Amino acid sequence: MARAGGPSRRAALVGPAALVLAATASACAAQTAGAGTLVAYFSRSGNTRVIAGQLHRELKADLFEIAPREPYPEDYEEQVRLATRERDAGFRPALKAPAPDIAGYQTLLLCFPIWGETAPPIIRSFLAAHDLAGKTIRPIITHGGYGVGSAPAVVASHARGARVLPPFVMEADQERRTMTTVRGWMAEMQR
Ligand SMILES: Cc1cc2nc3c(=O)[nH]c(=O)nc-3n(C[C@H](O)[C@H](O)[C@H](O)COP(=O)(O)O)c2cc1C
């Protein structure tokens, strides 16, 4: 499954998106010069992981993967159903681990995909589990073509006392689209 292992090819940063990210990265770098920056990310299929890895390397910032204590399903459809249930119930899944020494960072680059038109439940868990008062948070969001929905509002409401900057937003490939394409190819092969 894509969660383990290195960056996937999904969010290959090309053209204008790469330029925007580079501009965001340097703007962040300017804002965070001399202050500790943590890149914290959640990613299922790898798109967000690629961006987090780039920010980690180019800003020389620390990197932390946000993960649930109970691993999420590998099956995509199962994951969509679970994410919908968790979102509708306002459920906050337990974290595998909190970010170490969050007090030592002034700036948090919080990277996550959109799930069900909002931030994944584990992002609410992460925000609620850490004292972020006085810190600066820049959401870094990927989505599959339907926009960020309520995610920026969710970050703002769960990060009490933090300064939340406008998000960097990027459309990235959908796992569903990949699966549909592969299924089409498999059907062709079986003819
Ligand atoms: C459970 C689930 C729900 C999703 N819901 C949405 C959605 O509401 N809107 C959207 O544009 N994309 C949605 N997507 C697509 C992802 O946001 C998009 O592909 C993202 O780049 C995946 O990031 P990742 O590869 O880091 O996991 C969803 C994906 C999953 C797995």
Image: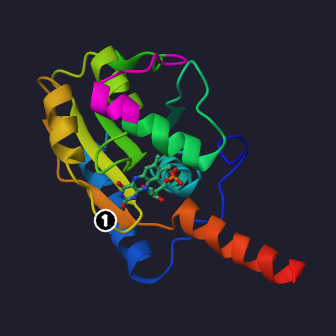
The amino acid type of the residue labelled 1 equals Tyr
Residue under label 1, please give it: 146
Give the answer, above or below, for where 128 lies relative to 108. Answer: above
Q: Is residue 108 magenta?
A: no
Can you say which quadrant of the picture contains the N terminus?
top right
Image quadrant assignment for residue 105: top left
* Magenta residues, start to end: 85-97
Question: Around disc 1, counting alpha carbons within 10 Å, would you say few (fewer than 14), some (14 to 19), or many (20 or more)?
Answer: few
> Residue at image x 29%, y 32%?
88
- Split into quadrants, the picture shows ligand 1 in the one at bottom left
Closest to the observer, 152 or 103: 152
Question: Which residue shows up at 43% across the image and 20% down it?
Answer: 93
**Does residue 186 appear in the picture of this structure?**
yes
Residue 88: within the magenta? yes
Taking the image as drawn, is residue 40 in sight?
Answer: no
Compared with 17, 31 (above or below) is above
Q: Secondary structure at mark 1?
A: loop
Q: Quadrant of residue 147?
A: bottom left
* Quadrant assignment for the C terminus: bottom right
Image coordinates for residue 62, horizontal then vertical, percent: 49, 35
Instruction: Give the residue drawn at x 44%, y 73%.
Output: 18
